[in-house]
Image (cartoon, grey):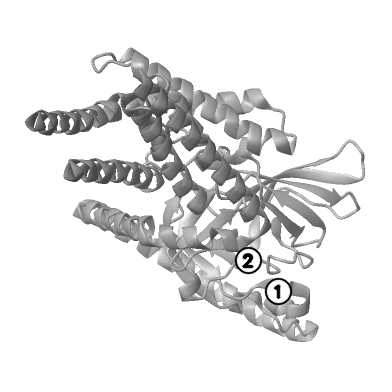
Amino acid sequence: MKKKNQASAFNRYLLLGLSIFCIIMMLLSSFSDRASGPFKVLANVTVIPLQQGINHIGSWLGDMTENFETMQQLRSENEKLQEQVDSLMTENNYLQEERYELERLQELYQLDSNYAEYEKTAAHVIGSDSGNWFSTFTIDKGSEDGIAVDMNVMAGSGLVGIVVDVGPTWAKVRSIIDDSSNVSGMVLSTSDRCIVSGDLALMSDGQIRFEQMENNENEVSVGDQIVTSYISDKYLQGILIGYVSEVTVDSNNLTRSGYITPAVDFKNIQEVLVITTTKAQLTGESEGE
Amino acid sequence: MKVLKMKRFLVTALIVIAAYLLQCTVFSRLELAGIKPNLLVIVTAAFGFMRGSKEGMLVGFVSGLLMDIQFGDVIGLYALIYLVTGYINGLFERLYFDDDIKLPILLIAASEFLYGVIIYFFMFLLRSDFDFLFYLNKIIIPELIYTIGITLILYPLILLINHKLESEEKRSASKFV
């Protein structure tokens, strides 16, 4: 009996001790990033290599099953693609023409910063958030590959999110559909600014919300492009966020809000591009600090 | 004796890391309606009522810490939640028998439900997001159901491993008497 009491007393002390440790760590890590440093190294030697391995096996298996697709399918696909090539050729010519026109106009406006020329580096997604509440994921490049906090992450042509945490060989990315994410955006055609925020309630519909857009005479219609705005201090200007899917005037008659369909399919992101220039570097260190 | 303790430690660590990796990689491809099950709650609760508060707490603490490092905003919050989960489940050790599956499922379901409510409370209610019913219907309940489904597969496995280890420990203990 005595032994049992001793054991339960020990358990209580253990509970108390570890709880206090957790609370102290919470306080420390909310004040300074340095507190979590040792833990990042811990993750780096334990789970990250394994996650990378599993990811490799997963993509290898994916390739294998693809190889078993029948010839028939490939043939019909080939035919379809040939048609597509033809139509794309015509379209390409047309676009080329437009490009020259654009170049001319750009010269006219002296737009020297072209955001298509940000330097990017590719990374694989190796793990997604283990819970259902948030939408963050880890990629297989970290500070050793030159990744730093606040770098923008893209997939295809659209904005995916931002690097919020970096370990030696991995980085944590918070996607823009995450409930705690806010991005300053603007309508490409009218330059009206708005706040784009992720919402857990909309995540399953694959949509995000925008609000606080000025209700002026500029018309915003469904299908308009929303890009990151020029006033954001973390997101580079002009990255495509998505397309307006619904817009309404708020009851205060001063602002407009609505929904955006993101340009990226967040359900299956496998590879992302990290832009290795941060906004702070572009605008000068003094503003960035 | 020492070898066996070492073995138990290694096997437990392996189970925790395997559950964590499965959850981050494989199960994020096996989502049903955008929901994935919570393997770590199963493992933590199972070790709690099978092996007592101490092991439940340690298993919970480590799995929570792993989540904190990779996905948490602050280090320690998930660790604390899982720590308490392990401790409370450990209190049910004396009510627990191997062949009874009702109690484990009940305990795991209760842990999972409370886990969801606590996460909502800390991460959403404190940001003045009061739509509890929405989160209950869209996340907490579906996650609960999926987790129980996985429990029916995962729990017998953990039980089997625990049985093997325990019988080995008993054998070596009787050798010394």
User: Which quadrant is the C terminus of chain B positioned in?
Assistant: top left
Q: Secondary structure at mark 2?
A: loop
The residue at which mark 2 appears reads as A150
Q: Are the residues tagged 1 and 2 within 8 Å (C-beta)?
A: yes
Q: Is residue B23 left or right of residue A251?
A: left
The location of residue A63, given as percent across then percent down, is 26, 57
Extreme-front residue of the structure = A2
Query: Could you tell whether A262 is left or right of A113 in the image?
Result: left
Asked if residue A40 is positioned above or below residue A282 in the image, the reply reads above
Image label count = 2
The location of residue B128, given as percent across then percent down, is: 75, 35
Give A145 or B94, whichever is nearer the viewer.
B94
Asked whether A67 or B42 is in front, the reply is: B42
Judge the density around disc 1: few (<14), some (14-19), many (≥20) Cα neighbours within 10 Å. Answer: some
State which quadrant residue B102 falls in: top left
Label located before the other in sequence (1 or 2): 2
Can you identify the residue that label 1 sits on? A280
The answer to which of A27 and A131 lies nearer the viewer is A27
Asked if A227 appears above or below A217 in the picture, the reply is: below
Chain ID, mark 1: A
Q: Nearer the viewer, residue B32 or A279?
A: A279
Indicate the chain on which mark 2 is placed. A
- Residues tagged by mark 1 and mark 2 found on one chain of the structure: yes
Q: Quadrant of the N terminus of chain B?
A: top left
